[in-house]
Amino acid sequence: MASNGYAIGASQESPSTEPGKGYFMENGRCGTGMWSLDVAKRFFSRGDSLIHGVDLSTLMQASQIYPNNKFEAMDIEEPWHTDNRQNRALVPGTGWIEHVEVDWNPYNDTGPVSPRLRYWIDELFDAMDQIKRPLRLDPPATQQALANAGFVDIKQEVLHMFVNGGAINPYDIDVGRWFNLCLHKSFMNISLAPFFRVKKWKPEQIEQLKEDVLDEIGERNNRSYCKL
């Protein structure tokens, strides 16, 4: 999503890319291609540039794309074929990546986090901890892992994503609406396996928790947020 000078998922403020020129690859969860299309339109619609979206499937992408867009179906964790391997050698010393993670731990600067949202996340964290796939973020460890891999000039930027569009400034309203929609669309995808397989919940219990949480985050005075 792009707003207020940001493309969430990619900042146009890279010190290594000239406006209108460059190569951008969105690895992995390209989804609908919204991010790639937005970057192509807003930042690289003119000039010698390519915005390359990669996902397991291209079925969700728009039928009409910009000339400097390219979408490809592949598993980014599998061995890359020749033309993608060549990307690693383009403009040596000037490439950059943006690594994006969601801190699912909810916050609220004006009061307590809404109770059902807090309960959902605590139970989700516990389930994922039990199977040794923790969702808890450790930014220092992530930065150290990037440094160990050879990346330099590592910077961290934290954005707030409110659970609805009840904010005051346009940026938070826009992001809050999108995040609320994401929670509506992805609640069961995130929750079903951990709660059913690990916590041994019944499907109807998970569905009830979904309704409770979504009702709660729909209240416009709910100022809870997660961090990106």
Image (spheres, rainbow, N blue to C red):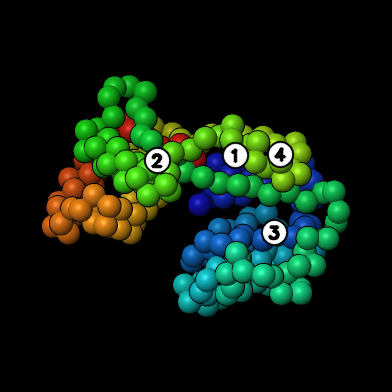
Secondary structure beneath dot 1 equals: helix
Mark 1 Cα within 10 Å, few/some/many (few <14, many 20+)?
few
Dot 4 corresponds to which residue?
A: 147
Q: Circles 4 and 2: CB distance less than 8 Å?
A: no
Dot 3 corresponds to which residue?
A: 24
Closer to viewer: mark 4 or mark 3: 4
Q: Residue furthest right?
A: 92
Dot 2 corresponds to which residue?
A: 104
Secondary structure beneath dot 4 equals: helix
Q: CA distance from mark 4 to mark 2?
A: 24 Å
Q: CA distance from mark 1 to mark 3?
A: 22 Å
Q: Which disc number belongs to residue 51? A: none
- Identify which amino acid the numbered label 3 is placed on: Phe
- Identify which amino acid the numbered label 1 is placed on: Thr
Q: CA distance from mark 1 to mark 2?
A: 16 Å
User: In terms of image quadrants, where is residue 165?
Assistant: top left
